[in-house]
Amino acid sequence: MKNSVSKSRPLPTISLQDVGGLGEEMKEEIMQTLSTIKEPERAIKLGIKPPKGILLYGPPGTGKTLLAQAIARELNAAFFTASGSAFNELFVGIGASRVRSLFQTARKQGPAVIFIDEVDALAGKRKAHGGEEAEKTLTELLVQLDGGHSNDGILFIAATNRKDMLDEAFLRPGRIDFSFQVPLPDTRGRREIINIHTKGKSLAEDVFASLDDLAESTSGFSGAELQSLFETASRRAVRNGQDMIHKHDLDYALDRTILGNTSRSLQEY
Ligand code: ATP
């Protein structure tokens, strides 16, 4: 729904364990960053300002939304989410008032994470952005980011596939303090993600034995594609009246995903 700013207040159930392929170094960096938010007094004594904003950037389907939810859970914070395009309006001032209202609602809530996906639609470079309405909306976002205190319990997380499109003013420290790249997973990452998405699923012995090979052979797959692979295989198993996923279900799902990827990349040319 383009114009709705969806808000989900309950604590997310996703934890950092549910996000595969982040790598130890990145996990460690994230935990360190979060510890300055969890213990702001200590951080300030050590001369560190808890961050106000974090940017997650990388290709589609790599788990940026998942990671934002896991961060909110780690902070025991309510999760407010909206897509950047939900703020694009024809009438001057409407987008800006939506931004204001989102921050106001989150501030009332106490500890909260505000997550904006596709933030390039909201905080794109001003030159390319164009239009008075878009300009006003971005300015309001900057005002809200500047207005909050680093220890007011609000963490702003933005995600994009196009970091290069973002306005420099938006990326300034004090607004966005940390940028984390969430790339396509490598073989080890894919193996972790496969583990996550096969947990609780009944797998035949031949599937179980092929999971290392699957991780090897799915170079270029995102976490979302791996998730959909097992989803497709499960659905086929149910359709065939089986009580577990067999290798032929996985092969079928793999063919369909590869076919989907090929037609997508052909369309891109
Ligand atoms: P987009 O840029 O398109 O918004 P995204 O990076 O935010 O994508 P998600 O929405 O978090 O990606 O991923 C979609 C789904 O794919 C997740 O709900 C999850 O099931 C699966 N997934 C993606 N990445 C991962 C990952 N790293 N670990 C585990 N599951 C993943």
Image: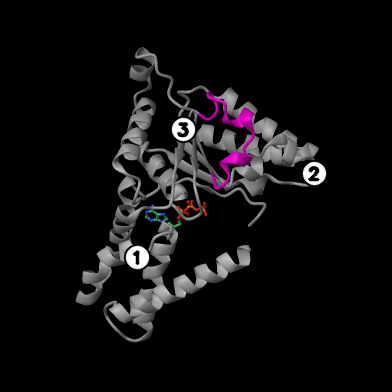
Compute the Cα span from label 2 to label 3.
31 Å
Residue extending farthest to the front is: 269
Query: Which residue corresponds to the image point at 22% horizontal and 76% vertical from the top-left?
Result: 206
Looking at the image, residue 41 lies above or below residue 80: above
| Circle nearer the viewer, 3 or 1 | 1
- Of residues 32 and 133, the one drawn nearer to the viewer in this rendering: 32
Q: Which residue is mark 1?
A: 217
Quadrant in the picture for the C terminus: bottom right
> Counting other residues with Cα less than 10 Å from the Cα at mark 3, is it few (<14), some (14-19), or many (20 or more)?
few
* Amino acid type assigned to the residue bearing label 3 in the image: Gly
| Amino acid type for the residue under numbered disc 1 | Ser
Question: Mark 2 highlights which residue?
Answer: 91
Q: Which residue of the protein is positioned furthest toward the bottom in this rendering?
A: 240
Mark toward the start of the polypeptide (3 vs 1): 3
Query: Identity of the amino acid at label 2?
Result: Phe
Span highlighted in magenta in the image: 160-176
Q: Is residue 204 visible?
A: no
Q: Residue at x 52, y 70 (%)?
A: 262
Q: Is residue 229 left or right of residue 212?
A: right
Residue 121: percent from left, percent from top: 65, 45
- Which residue in the protein does label 3 denote? 110
